[in-house]
Amino acid sequence: MLRKKLAVLLATAMVAASIVGCGGADQAAAPADGAPAAADDAAAEDAAPAEDAADDAAADDAAEAPAASGDVITVGYAQVGHESDWRTANTQNYQDVFSAENGYELSLIDCDNDNAVQLEAVRNFITQQLDYIVIAPIETAGWDTVLQEAQDAGIPVIIADREIDADASLYDAWVGTNTKNEGVTAGNWLAEYLDGKEANILIIEGSVGASAALGRSEGFDEVAAQHSEWKILDHQSGDFTQDGGQEVMESFIKSYEGQFNVVVCHNDNEAYGAMDAMDAAGITYGVDGDVIIISFDATHDGLQYTLDGKINCNVECNPIQAAVVAEVIQKMQNGESFEATTLVNDEAFVAPGIESQYATTMTEEILAGRAY
Ligand code: AHR
């Protein structure tokens, strides 16, 4: 078993963030709480496709490079669970990138959205003395002790997908998306679409305590606060699941039938559940309906609904992150400098017939290119 901490100590962690497909000085340093700085909408819009391609190619190369020493690199991934299509795509992506063929032995634990199980999974990785630990944290809070244990054991930790509240000195790198920016994009699109008309909004949030839910709420609320003609009627957690989305929407319909014209769902699976509940209640939605639907994730099926005009706007959260994590690991492995914070770029998509400065209008070609 190789001890990688030495290589990590020798490496000079670049304080400047590497931003995959997203330029902007805002992300130049990892803040003390470990969260990436808020992305700037304009900077994200300006990202050069050529840079995207170059960064993606570099990440792909790193993902495919075998361990420099010829030894297998052992990686533990404490995955959130299997709550959504996004999560399934993310798990598959890790299995593809951290394969035996690529020189890795991946121990992936599905933590079933249970914090205790996730902490135990990380502790097992430490006991097994794996070379690297990757954590997609279920919740932002409660990480200090176990991260200290990993650090004491000399095992580098990469936080992926979501953010945590712990001091950045307790882990080595962070890779993920800017969920606050996703919420801001959703809000900006709604303001543009409504153009001053009233909005009575219901929000089906993601899992309580998850940074993906907190960030999307924070970003959307920030835009909502600038619109006195908007009213948020209610917000409840649908736990990022289809069943959760349906249950919350059924309860919203009982309380607010006839009073709402916007439903914001924190992921595609919640949106599917909400649409089922509205179908059952005879409520129309989408571009030809009474209710505007905003979703997040932009997975294949979510984009199919967007193309069909059922979801008005779908803000992407990119699950394809493993190659970037592998690139960081390869640099640590080689004793090279590595990125402390890597932001994976997101786009937004709108239904045909909608033109937006914040989102791309959906086409069959875009859907055909969406593998997950
Ligand atoms: O952390 C990413 C979020 O978690 C995705 O939006 C959601 O689908 C997943 O469960």
Image (spheres, rainbow, N blue to C red):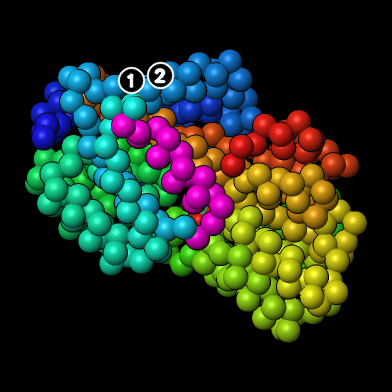
Compared to residue 303, the image places residue 84 above or below, namely: below
Q: Is residue 242 left or right of residue 76?
A: right
Taking the spot 55% from the left edge, 19% from the top edge, the residue there is: 53
Is residue 345 visible in this depiction of the protein? yes
In the image, what residue occupies the spot 80% across and 55% down? Answer: 310
Residue depicted at 67% across the width and 81% down the height: 251
Q: In this view, does 114 lie to the left or right of 300?
A: left
Look at the numbered disc 2 and give the secondary structure of its residue: helix
**Picture coordinates of residue 233 (x, y %)?**
69, 73
Q: Give the range drawn in magenta.
A: 83-100
Identify the residue at image location x=34%, y=27%: 101
Whether residue 80 is situated above or below residue 238 in the rendered picture? above
Q: Quadrant of the C terminus?
A: top right
Position of residue 230 in the picture relative to residue 89 (left or right): right
- Location of mark 2 (residue): 61
Q: Residue 132, image x and y in percent? A: 22, 39
Viewport quadrant of the N terminus: top left
Can you tell me whether the CB of the residue at mark 1 lies under 8 Å from the nearest atom of ligand 1? no
- Image coords of residue 368 (percent x, y): 71, 34
Q: Which amino acid, by three-letter code, is at mark 1?
A: Ala
Magenta span contains residue 99: yes
Magenta stretch, overall SS: helix
Task: Choose top left, top right, bottom left or bottom right for residue 156.
Answer: top left
Q: Are marks 1 and 2 in contact (CB under 8 Å)?
A: yes
* Residue type marked 2: Asp
Q: Residue 65 carries which label?
A: 1
* Residue furthest to the front: 101
Mark 1 closeness class: few <14, some 14–19, many ≥20 residues within 10 Å = some
